[in-house]
Image: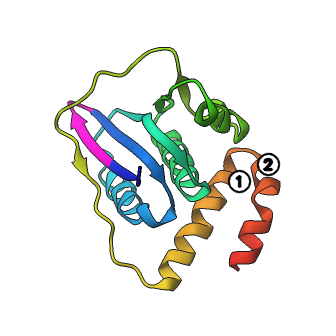
Amino acid sequence: MDGVIYSARVGEIEYIKFCGTVRYSHCSGLEAHIDHLFEKADFEEVVVDLEDAEILDSTALGLLARVAIELKKITDIQPVVFVKKGELSNILKRVCFDQVFNIISDAKIDTLSDYSELTNVAQDEQEVLRRVIDAHKYLAKVDAGNEAMFKDITQALK
C-alpha cells in the first residue's frame, strides 16, 4: 500500500497517523506540518499512530525523531507511539526511539474519524535533498549509533 500521512487534533492532543509504506516522497507535507505545529506550540501531547504503517524509510523516521526532539524543548512529556509488534516495532527499537518516545505495542489506539491527509508541498530537488539530510541529522541526535548507521546515506547525499 502506498504511503499516506494524516493528522488530527483532539483537545490538546496532536495525532499523526502513518499508513502503508511511507517514504521520503511522502514527507514534505509532514515536514511542513511539524514546522507549523512547533511554531504555534498550542498542544500538550503528541500521539503517533503507526498501527496501519507497513514501512517507514529513514527520512520518515528522522522526521519522527524531530517531533520527539522539538517536543522535549517545550515539555518533559515524551510523545506516544502506537505500533503493532513486528518488524516496524523492532526498527523503532533499533534506532533507539524507545529513548525518546513512549512506545506502546500491546494496545490499540481508538480510531479517530477526523483525520486530515497531510498533502505534499511542492519542492525542488535541492529542497528534497535538504529535507532528507536534515531528517537524518535528527536521527543522529537520538543516538550516536544512528549516526554511524546512516553515515553512508548522509555522505552520499552531500
Q: Which residue is disc 2 drawn over?
A: 144
Give residue 123's position: percent from left, percent from top. Answer: 40, 79
Magenta span has 77? no
Q: Camera-side residue: 103 or 41?
A: 103
Quickly name the residue at label 1. 140
Name the residue rendered at 62%, 69% in the picture.
Answer: 133
* Crowd class of label 1 (few under 14; some 14 to 19; many from 20; radius 10 Å): many
Judge left or right: residue 28 versus residue 9: right
Q: CA distance from mark 2 to mark 1?
A: 6 Å
Quadrant of the rendering where the C terminus is positioned: bottom right
Name the disc covering residue 128, or none.
Answer: none
**Label 1 amino acid?**
Ala
**In the image, what residue occupies the spot 51% across and 63% down?**
24
Q: Which residues are magenta?
A: 6-12
Left or right of 66? Residue 35 is left
In percent of width and height, residue 85 lies at: 57, 24
Q: Is residue 52 above or below residue 70?
A: above
In this view, the residue farthest toward the front is 1
Q: Is residue 21 left or right of residue 17?
A: right
Q: Taking 89 as reference, is 25 above or below it? A: below
Residue type highlighted by circle 2:
Ala
Q: Main secondary structure of the magenta part?
A: strand
